[in-house]
Structures are given as structure tokens and as C-alpha cells.
Amino acid sequence: MGLEIRTFGDPVLKSQAAPVVDVDGRAIRLVEQMFDTLDHSDGGIALAAPQIGVQKQVVVWDLDGDRRAIFNPEIVESSGEWVYDEGCLSIPGLYVELVRPRTVLLRGVDVNGEIIEYEADDLEARMYQHELDHLNGVLMFDRMGDEQRREAMAEYRRITSGEADDTPRPRRLRFR
């Protein structure tokens, strides 16, 4: 069934996550709980520990059956620019165009305690950047300009209040 995914307004989502000191049994159990939660989410491809209320630097993802976890991830290189509709399990129903680097080099520690690196572009790169934002207490709204944020917040309020029930979901907001 998974754990509850924290949603916008929960203060845990605005806090900095602490590094994982040891990849031990406790850390592996957390990864298993996170995968269980991701499996029961509404179409999510990745999850950061703060989204389930755990202030640790852990991210899990499942891209087309490729399930992985990383501890203490950091982006060590990025380049390019890519505009794409981005959504978030902690801001359900809202998709907004955001600009992020197109390619990244991600470094962290795997479940065996080994240092790993992933080179990624497009959706995979965006996913890493989005989840690392969660580890730093940053949400999609924080990545928006003032006007875009006002419109996105208004739309999210409509979605969460039920006023948008006759509107097909997910609704995508595009900003130029």
C-alpha cells in the first residue's frame, strides 16, 4: 500500500534533508518502503525521502522497469536547457512548463555503499534535478517566476478545492 506522500503545505517538504551516514539495514528498509510507496503512487516515476516525511538524502526511481536508489546524490555537471511539463507527487494534478538543464552528471552512493555516477539527459536528467530539489526543500513553485507562480498556485487551489472537477486532469499550464 505504501506510505503517505506528503503534499504541498507540509513543512517537511521545505526542509533540507540530512546525508545518509551508513548504507545499512535501516537505509535499505527505507528504500524498500519508498519503492512500495512509488509503486502505489498515481503514476510517479521517482520519489525523494522527504516526500514520505523522512529527512534523509535518499531518492528512488523506476524508469521503464529500471529500478534504482541513490543516497546523498549531487549533480556535479549540467549543461543545455530544456523546457518541459513537470509534475510532482507532492503537488498532485498540476503540470507546469519549467526550464532546467538538459543534461546532468549525477553522483552518489548505491545500495552497496559504492560511489556511482549516472549521465542523463531529457526526462531522466529532469527527474534527478526534481528529486534533488526535494532533498533541498525546493518545490516546483520555487522554480517559477512571480506571474507563473501566481497562476500555478491559483490552479492548484482550484484542483485541491474540487472546483476543477469538470476540467480534464492533469491540467498543464504553459508559460512563456
Image (cartoon, rainbow, N blue to C red):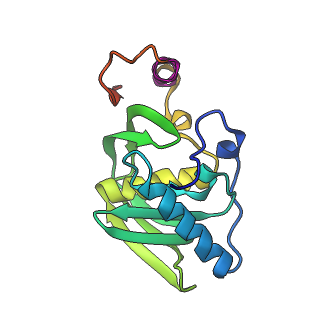
Quadrant of the snapshot with the C terminus = top left
Residue visible at 46% across and 22% down in the picture: 159
| Quadrant assignment, res 68 | bottom left
Percent x, y for residue 18?
A: 71, 63
Prevailing SS of the magenta stretch: helix
Residue visible at 39% across and 55% down in the picture: 45
Percent x, y for residue 24?
A: 66, 82
Pick the residue in front: 101 or 129.
129
For residue 147, side relative to residue 79 (left or right): right
Is residue 153 covered in magenta? yes
For residue 23, side relative to residue 167 (left or right): right
Query: In the rendered image, is residue 9 in sight?
Result: yes
Magenta segment: 148-161
Q: Is residue 164 above or below residue 127?
A: above
Residue visible at 50% across and 28% down in the picture: 145
Is residue 137 covered in magenta? no
For residue 110, side relative to residue 173 (left or right): right
Residue visible at 42% across and 31% down in the picture: 94
